[in-house]
Amino acid sequence: MKTAIATSLEYLAQMLGDPHAQIYERLYRQHPEVQALFVLDTDGSVRGAMLQTTLETIFDYAAKGRLDSLSLGAWRSHHLAYDVNPELFTRFFFIIRDCAKAELGSAWTADMESAWIDLLLQVRASETE
Ligand code: HEM
């Protein structure tokens, strides 16, 4: 089931190449206030690394069937210094799911839906670990 997550991201990459632009557009639409946090990232490389790390966390979860909540917790705490609270931090995972679901359209499957729900529940649960 969890491999359905990896498949959804592979399709997304096939459709868009690098999904960076669409994911950050979606983030800024839903949370316009965060755009100001990235002013120093003039070449987009920090945002690139941030997306990369999040995707690696998701692929790692898909491969192992469990979330590396230790490493995720470290990133989450690190973000408090940027004024990114734990709930907002979690939102990035929802935004990636929403982007994949919107782009895949009819290629989005019931397995993808339920595998993503499991992951998002675990990411949310790890907010208080
Ligand atoms: C909507 C949620 C999030 C917001 C608003 C956010 C915001 C930020 C900000 C403001 C920076 C620093 C920008 C700069 O230095 O110019 C940053 C860096 C970074 N973020 Fe996020 N972040 C979010 C979610 C995440 C998630 C879920 C992960 C990974 C699991 C992540 C990983 C990183 C990494 C790897 C960096 C760059 C390395 C570093 O800070 O030293 N971020 N993020």
Image (cartoon, helix red, strand yellow):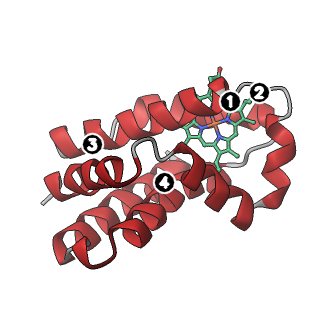
Q: Tell us which disc is closer to us: 4 or 1.
A: 1
- Relative to 50, does residue 21 appear above or below in the rendering? below
Q: Secondary structure at mark 2?
A: loop
Q: Mark 2 packing: few (<14 Cα in 10 Å), some, or many (20+)?
A: few
On the rendered structure, is 77 left or right of 18? right
List the residue tagged with mark 4.
93
Distance of label 4 from label 2 (alpha carbons):
21 Å
Q: Residues within 10 Å of mark 3 (few under 14, many from 20)?
A: some
Type of residue at label 3? Answer: Tyr
Relative height, residue 85 to residue 38 (above, below): below
Name the amino acid type tagged 2: Asp
Q: Earlier in the sequence, mark 4 or mark 1?
A: 1
On whether ligand 1 comes within 8 Å of the CB at mark 2, the answer is yes
Specify the amino acid type for callout 4: Phe
* Residue 116 x %, y %: 31, 63
**Amino acid on which the number 1 mark rests in the picture:** Gly
Secondary-structure class at tag 1: loop
Residue that label 2 marks? 41
Residue receiving disc 3: 61
> Depth-wise, is mark 1 or mark 3 nearer the camera?
1
The label on residue 44 is: 1
Q: Give yes or no for contact between labels 3 and 4 (Cβ–Cβ under 8 Å).
A: no
Instruction: Using the image, tell me which numbered label, if any, was put on residue 104.
Output: none
